[in-house]
Amino acid sequence: MLRYIGRRLLNYAVLLFVAVSLTFVLAATQLNPRALFQLRQPPIEPAIIEQQLLKNNLSDTVPLLDRYWTWLTGVFRGDWGSSPLGVNVAEQISTRMWVSLRLLLIGTLSGIIIGVAVGAWSATRQYKISDRTITVISLLIISTPAFVIGHLAQIGATMYNNVSRTRTFEFIGETGDVGDYPLAALVDRAQHLLLPTLVLIVLGAASMSRIQRNLMLDSLGADYVRTARAKGLPESKAVMKHALRTALIPTGTYFAFSVATMFVGATFTERIFSFPGIGQYGVDTITNRDVYGVVAVTAFAGVCVLMGAVLSDIMVAILDPRVRLQ
C-alpha cells in the first residue's frame, strides 16, 4: 500500500506543479497589479508605482520567466510572495486556513454523516410519506442558492434573538464583544459559529441525502441482497451488512473529496457571515489583483484535492474487500 500511495502522490505532485505554474502565468499576465495603483486618488507617481511593483516582483517590465523563477525559488524557501500592497501571502494562508477549519469542520462532517443516514433510511421507505417529505425538503434546499439560505437563516436568527431576548446567535464575524465571565471567549466563538455551522449542515445533508438514497436504492435491488433475504437473513442485517456497505463505497470517494476541499468550498458561507477564511481570501485576491495570492490559493486547493484523491483510494479499499492497493 505504501508503494501505491507513494506512486500516486508523485503523479499528483507533477500535476499540481503544472497546474500552479499555469495559474502563475495566467494571473501574472491578466490581473495587472499596476492598475491597482493607477486608480488611486490622488494619483501616485509612476516611478513610485514601479518601485513598489519591483519590490514585490510584480512589475510587467520584468520578463515573465524571470518573475516566475524568482517566485519559484522563493517558494522552495517558504516564501510565497507578497500582494501588491506588501501583505505576506504565506501568513495570510496560514492564518485563514485555521479560520476556515474552525468554521467548516463540524458543519461539513455533520452534514455528510446526517445526509448519509437520512438518505439510507429514506431509501428503505421508498415512496412512503416520509420518503416523499424528505425528498421535497431536500430538493427545495438544493434548488435554493446558498447565499439565500444564509440570509434567511440570519433573518430567522435575528427574530429568535428578539423574541427570546438573548444573544444565542451571533453571526457577523468570527468573534464579537466578549463578556466578563468565565469562558466568555469560548462562548462568544460558539455563538458566532452556531448559525453558519447549521447552514452548512443543512446544505450538506440535503445534497448528500439525495446521493445516498439513489445509491442505496441500487444496492437494495441487487441480486446479492435479494439472495440474502431469500436465505432468511433478517431485513435489518440484509440492509446494514450488504446493501448499506456496498452503497457506502462511492460515498467514501465523495466524502474524502468533500472533507479535503472544504477549505475552498464554502466561499458564500464565509462571505455572508464575514469569516476571513480561505474561500473569501480566494475571491479577494482576484478583486485586489493579488497575483501571488491567487497562485497560493490554487496551490492550497490543489494540495487538498491531492489529499482527497489518495484518501478516497484508501477508503474504497477499506469499504470494498475486492479492492487491493498494489
Image (tube, helix red, strand yellow):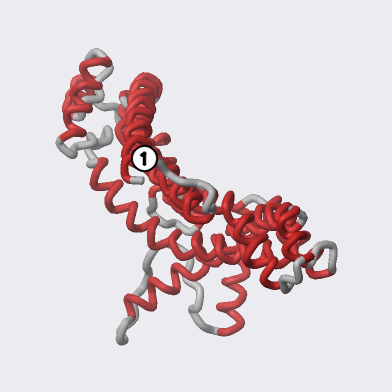
Quadrant assignment, res 221 = bottom right
Residue closest to the far front = 231
Across and down, in percent, residue 319 comes to 52, 56
Task: Give the class, few, some or many, for how many residues have Cα within 10 Å of label 1's Cα (few <14, many ≥20).
Answer: few
Res 322 seen here:
yes
Res 290 seen here:
no
Looking at the rendering, in which quadrant would you find the C terminus? top left
The residue that appears at 23% across and 36% down in the rendered structure is 80
Across and down, in percent, residue 273 comes to 48, 59
The answer to which of 50 and 318 lies nearer the viewer is 318
Which residue is under mark 1?
4
Please state if 210 lies on the left or on the right of 55 as rendered.
right
Across and down, in percent, residue 44 comes to 25, 27
Across and down, in percent, residue 173 comes to 41, 62
The residue that appears at 49% across and 62% down in the rendered structure is 109
Quadrant assignment, res 201 = bottom right
The residue that appears at 48% across and 66% down in the rendered structure is 171
Q: How many marks?
A: 1
Q: SS at mark 1? A: helix
Residue closest to the far bottom = 181
Q: Is 139 placed above or below 40 here? A: below
Please state if 180 lies on the left or on the right of 206 as rendered.
left
The answer to which of 285 and 80 lies nearer the viewer is 80
The residue that appears at 58% across and 79% down in the rendered structure is 162
Please state if 136 lies on the left or on the right of 20 as rendered.
right
> What amino acid is labelled 1 in the image?
Tyr
Please state if 96 lies on the left or on the right of 156 as rendered.
left
The answer to which of 143 and 270 lies nearer the viewer is 143
